[in-house]
């Protein structure tokens, strides 16, 4: 493993991009931030000054800079595929935030380019794989502690979303995390999906179905239920439980602490995804850097990105049609074994 610091370029410096800048610069080891690009030029200059990086005028200049060894893409999803393809063409490792791309065709183009390049360069930002609670669940399942998985129950509750958020975005932005988590935990693909919109909260915009219940099925018949409720108001609450043939494993408590006073126990919970998954994001970026230094790719790969987008798009069709939508099972190329 090389002892040189990995020089990281970051494209898209909004919510999560700015967090990743801070993570690479201040929270992990083995890397530093050298170049940034964002269309919001004033903000990116300020962020660059804070970490001793340069703000470059285009994304291509970040990707091709001789001072950049690896790239994080945190721009809006519609730009992910084109930017990832440029990173592959430059022969540089890239951590692309989810989704790998909004369409299956764009994801397939990334897989084709990466395989033609002959080297695994792409990691996708499915950070729940780095969360201690989810890893504990996977370890329990793999060790046989709960027997065979039969049902996977998930809940994904956000306090609120902007008015521009749509029922389809609940699938492509929120449930896509449960899609990846389910594939990773169970080690099999999702083959069908149905979305039910029942009684609606008065707190959502009138165009938004909220909450929605997503029912999926895996290849071996495991039922996966996901309640997605993006205007839950009370806090950020992600839950997960696998019901097995001999037991149950679930995420442990995600409470941030408590106090007792006047005969009441008050528990503080995460206010948002940033707080809840802060440690997981840190572990994800550290693992990505360690993988680059060791010359061995880690984390979710392009095939995982494609598989997640395939199911998310099927869920979008299920929202629109109200029908059960079948998801074709893709053959995983040996390149991604
Ligand atoms: P955001 O706050 O809107 O940040 C995106 C940034 O990219 C903004 O500064 C935006 O500038 C800029 N931008 C727009 N067009 C660009 C372009 N062509 N090239 C480069 N930058 C461009 O969004 P976000 O919430 O950070 O989300 C960014 C990505 O991360 C999305 O794909 C999202 O799904 C993903 N994400 C993942 C997680 C996770 O849990 N893994 C969490 C949050 C977000 P303007 O604001 O001026 O348009």
Image: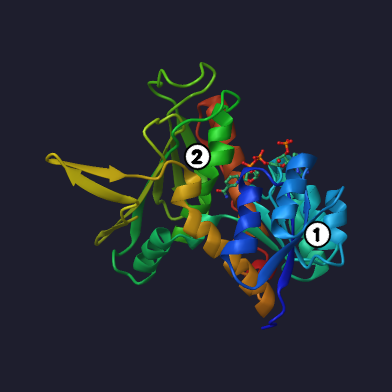
Q: Nearer the viewer, residue 243 or 120?
A: 120
Label 1 crowd (10 A; few <14 / some 14-19 / many >=20):
many
Give the label, 1 or 2, closer to the camera.
1
> Against 232, is 312 above or below?
below
Measuring from the top left, give residue 41's x and y in whole percent.
Answer: 79, 41
Left or right: residue 315 compared with residue 291: left
Is residue 180 rendered to the left or right of residue 238? right
Quadrant the C terminus occupies: bottom right
- Identify residue for label 1: 87
Label number found at residue 158: none
Looking at the picture, how far across and down is residue 129, in whole percent?
50, 60
Disc 2 is placed on an element classified as: strand
Instruction: Please tell me whether residue 166 is drawn above or below residue 308 in the rendered image.
Output: above
Mark number displayed over residue 193: 2
Specify the quadrant that holds the N terminus.
bottom right
Rendered residue at 41%/17% (across/down): 202
């Amino acid at each position: 493993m090389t002892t040189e610091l990995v020089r990281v370029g970051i494209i898209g410096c909004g919510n999560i991009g700015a967090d990743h800048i801070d993570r690479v610069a201040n929270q992990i080891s083995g890397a530093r931030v050298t170049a940034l690009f964002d269309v919001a030029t004033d903000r990116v200059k300020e962020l660059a000054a804070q970490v001793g990086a340069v703000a470059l005028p285009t994304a291509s200049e970040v990707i091709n800079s001789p001072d950049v060894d690896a790239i994080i893409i945190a721009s809006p999803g519609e730009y992910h595929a084109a930017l990832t393809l440029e990173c592959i063409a430059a022969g540089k490792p890239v951590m692309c935030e989810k989704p790998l791309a909004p369409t299956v065709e764009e994801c397939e183009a990334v897989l084709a380019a990466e395989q033609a390049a002959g080297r695994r360069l792409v990691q996708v930002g499915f950070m729940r794989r780095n969360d201690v609670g989810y890893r504990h669940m996977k370890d329990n399942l793999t060790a046989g502690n709960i027997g065979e998985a039969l049902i996977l129950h998930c809940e994904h509750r956000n306090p609120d979303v902007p008015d521009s958020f749509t029922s389809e975005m609940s699938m492509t932005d929120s449930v896509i995390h449960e899609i990846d988590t389910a594939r990773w935990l169970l080690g099999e693909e999702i083959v069908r999906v149905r979305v039910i919109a029942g009684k609606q909260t008065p707190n959502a915009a009138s165009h938004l179905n909220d909450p929605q219940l997503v029912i999926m099925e895996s290849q071996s018949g495991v039922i996966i239920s996901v309640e997605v409720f993006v205007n839950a108001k009370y806090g950020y609450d992600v839950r997960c439980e696998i019901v097995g043939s001999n037991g149950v494993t679930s995420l442990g408590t995600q409470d941030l602490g408590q106090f007792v006073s006047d005969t009441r126990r008050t528990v503080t919970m995460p206010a948002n995804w940033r707080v809840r998954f802060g440690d997981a994001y840190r572990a994800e970026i550290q693992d990505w850097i360690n993988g680059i230094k060791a010359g061995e790719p880690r984390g979710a790969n392009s095939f995982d990105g494609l598989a997640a987008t395939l199911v998310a798009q099927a869920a979008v069709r299920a929202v629109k049609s109200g029908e059960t939508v079948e998801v074709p099972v893709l053959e995983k190329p040996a390149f991604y074994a």
